[in-house]
DNA sequence: ATAAATCTGATTGTTTTAGTCAAGTATTTT
DNA sequence: AAAATACTTGACTAAAACAATCAGATTTAT
């Protein structure tokens, strides 16, 4: 699994837009930068991914900035993390040189797989709107049943190196 | 959060001891190395932490090796991860230079905190024994209530750098 | 025109991770 | 006693991932 500053900052930025974007006015990266203490350059880099992921819409030129591409209630943390990070990964197989046995699954495969689903269910259950509404108790969420997880927990695509 | 090869290999190694250690005979690192495709040197490094964490007992000399220090049912994945990795961390505050506002908590603090607890509840609910028994459905676990989590989700202790 | 913004590609420095190496100690077997 | 087995320890290195920056280009409101 990978939760880095990129993921954190991504969520912070999206939350910021939702909290401070008023009446059809887009939010500038400069404003986000000041409020969230994230450098402008870094935000620019982040918003490439967020835009590519379809989470924000941009308006260029003076008076421009960013909107959320859809209502905050329909943007999940999982969406953001996946937009800025590479896909969540918890199992190591497929491209493993050591540790995971090629062909047959190792004894811990199901553990990591279950863990990935567990984490994903959380990230998928929390929307940006919920983060903004302080009333929601994030510690007692209704999670989707495991069956409904569209195996969004993907493996990382990487070329296995042969030594 | 941090789940690295070290954590994976740590769990694999402990599981291996439980699966292959028979009748009072300790398991050698060489054996684990062969079965789990982990280099001996790396295992040596890993078992420092596992031993320091009180998860395994060692016997030196020929015929020596490692035992589990307590029954597999009483060793959780959380125990292993915490023994080999540094403590799990999901919030970024305390030592953050950017992103997280010093003094007041940032808008996403509760999110990351809840996420940390969510992950920990899983790691804490799964024992090595459960991983070995293939019948257990890791996707539908009984998790401890959040109140019982002894805030084992700790922050990383690190000196904040001043630039 | 000018300025305010987003956009884009590339690059850099730092930290973390993964893995190795060499030397040492305890214990059993021969 | 010697040799072999296996854990123990400290230090070290290479490679990858991460965080962050920079320079320049493009769009558009005024
Ligand atoms: S995680 Fe080891 S085989 Fe999938
Ligand atoms: S995570 Fe931002 S203040 Fe704690």
Image (cartoon, coloured by chain):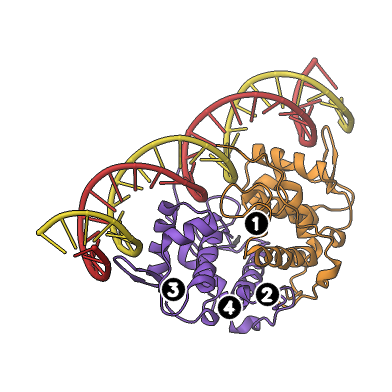
Chain colours: A orange, B purple, C red, D yellow
Disc 4: CA contacts within 10 A as few (<14), some (14-19) or many (>=20)? some
Image quarter for ligand 2? bottom right
How many marks overall?
4
Residue behind mark 4: B129
Indicate which disc, 3 or 4, sits on the residue closer to the N terminus: 3
Q: Earlier in the sequence, mark 4 or mark 2?
A: 4
Callouts 3 and 1 close, C-beta under 8 Å:
no
Q: Nearer the viewer, mark 3 or mark 1?
A: 3
Determine the secondary structure under disc 1: loop
**Mark 2 and mark 3: Cα distance apart in space:** 22 Å
**Mark 1 and mark 4: Cα distance apart in space:** 23 Å
Which element type, helix, strand or loop, lies under badge 3? loop
C-alpha separation, residue under disc 4 versus residue under disc 2: 9 Å
Residue indicated by mark 1: A1
Determine whether the residue tagged by mark 2 lies in a helix, strand or loop: loop
Mark 2 or mark 3, which has the lower sequence index?
A: 3
Residue B87 placement, left or right of A108? left
Determine whether, in the image, residue B37 is placed left or right of residue A82: left
Residue indicated by mark 3: B55
Res. A116 mark: none
Instruction: Mark 2 and ligand 1: say if the CB distance to the nearest ligand atom is below 8 Å.
Output: no
Mark 2 — on which chain does it sit? B
């Amino acid at each position: 699994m990978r939760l880095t500053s990129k993921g954190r900052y991504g969520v912070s930025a999206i939350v910021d837009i939702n909290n401070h974007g008023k009446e059809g006015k887009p939010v500038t990266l400069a404003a986000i930068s000041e409020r969230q203490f994230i450098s402008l350059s870094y935000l620019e880099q982040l918003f490439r991914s967020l835009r590519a992921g379809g989470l924000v819409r941009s308006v260029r030129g003076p008076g421009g900035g960013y909107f959320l591409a859809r209502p905050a209630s329909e943007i999940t943390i999982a969406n953001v993390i996946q937009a800025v990070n590479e896909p969540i990964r918890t199992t190591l197989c497929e491209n493993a040189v050591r540790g995971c046995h090629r062909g047959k699954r190792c004894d811990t495969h199901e553990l990591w797989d279950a863990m990935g689903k567990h984490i994903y269910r959380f990230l998928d259950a929390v929307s940006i709107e919920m983060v903004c509404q302080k009333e929601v108790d994030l510690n007692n969420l209704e999670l989707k049943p495991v069956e409904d997880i569209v195996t969004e927990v993907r493996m990382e695509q990487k070329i296995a190196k042969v030594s």
